[in-house]
Amino acid sequence: MTDVIASREQVSTRREATRQRLAWAAIRVFARKGVDGASVEEICEEAGFTRGAFYSNFESKNDLCLDVLQRSIDQTYQTLSTQLPRVSASELPIEQKLDRAVDLFLSTVSTDPQTILAINEIRLQAARDPELRPAYRALNESCTPALRDLVADVIAANDVRLGISVDDLLSIMRTLYDQQMIEAIISGNPADHLAVARQMTALLKVLMRV
């Protein structure tokens, strides 16, 4: 029995490694050609796999798109859920807590130009493709409550007055981040975290009336 369990775990580990390589390959191809312009064959070639490896792990290119998004969301939430409460509970002044919170957020999201472009290409594809759209929306909606509750708890714990809803706050901050990171790529400064951090912190202070 132990050998059977170990064998299953090994297969599961190998499969996850394959899925991860396909996801990273998709990011690179999506960044270059967009989702619509990227073929399954090109993604497989980029990853060093056959079509058989692709279809044994993903039902379709849309399925792969959702996996790429889920990995990005998981990475951000897992770090924020453990680190943000620690920042909130510290004895720092609220202004410094906001600085730390923004720095923490930026450390969890990708600043890699290819990843930023790929995520935005998937979003655009969801706007174009009626088959991808419902699943994309459902994925976003399934992740929002946990992040909203996390941020709401931090706001309440620090007795901060927020002039808008937490949902609106998250939407505004995401829009600012997405816009500024794309602009940074266009301007040739994709790693300009400091400018993005300054803008996000300044906006938070206004919205939170700090």
Image (cartoon, grey):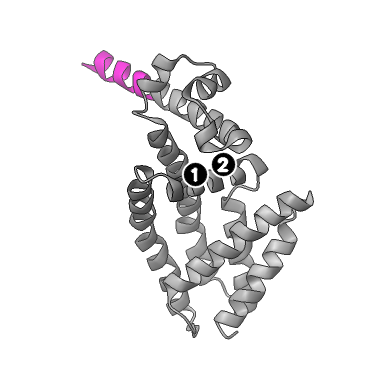
Task: Tell me if 51 is positioned left or right of 98 in this view.
Answer: left
Is residue 4 part of the magenta span, yes or no? yes
How many neighbours does mark 2 have within 10 angstroms: few (below 14), some (14-19), or many (20 or more)? many
- The overriding secondary structure of the stretch rendered in magenta is helix
Q: Are marks 1 and 2 in contact (CB under 8 Å)?
A: yes
Q: Which residue is mark 1?
A: 122
Residue at the (49%, 44%) spot, across then down: 122
Q: Which residue is mark 2?
A: 118
Relative to 62, say whether 155 is above or below: below
x and y percent of residue 160 in the render?
Answer: 50, 83
Q: CA distance from mark 1 to mark 2?
A: 6 Å
Q: Dot 1 lies on which element? A: helix
Task: Tell me if 189 is positioned left or right of 46 in this view.
Answer: right
Task: Tell me if 60 is positioned left or right of 171 in this view.
Answer: left
Q: Dot 2 lies on which element? A: helix
x and y percent of residue 167 in the render?
Answer: 42, 70
Badge 2 amino acid: Ala
Residue at the (78%, 53%) spot, across then down: 187
Where is residue 178, by image quadrant?
A: bottom right
Image quadrant where one finds the N terminus: top left
Image quadrant where one finds the C terminus: bottom right
- Give the extent of the magenta segment: 1-12
Where is residue 199, by image quadrant?
A: bottom right
Badge 1 amino acid: Ile
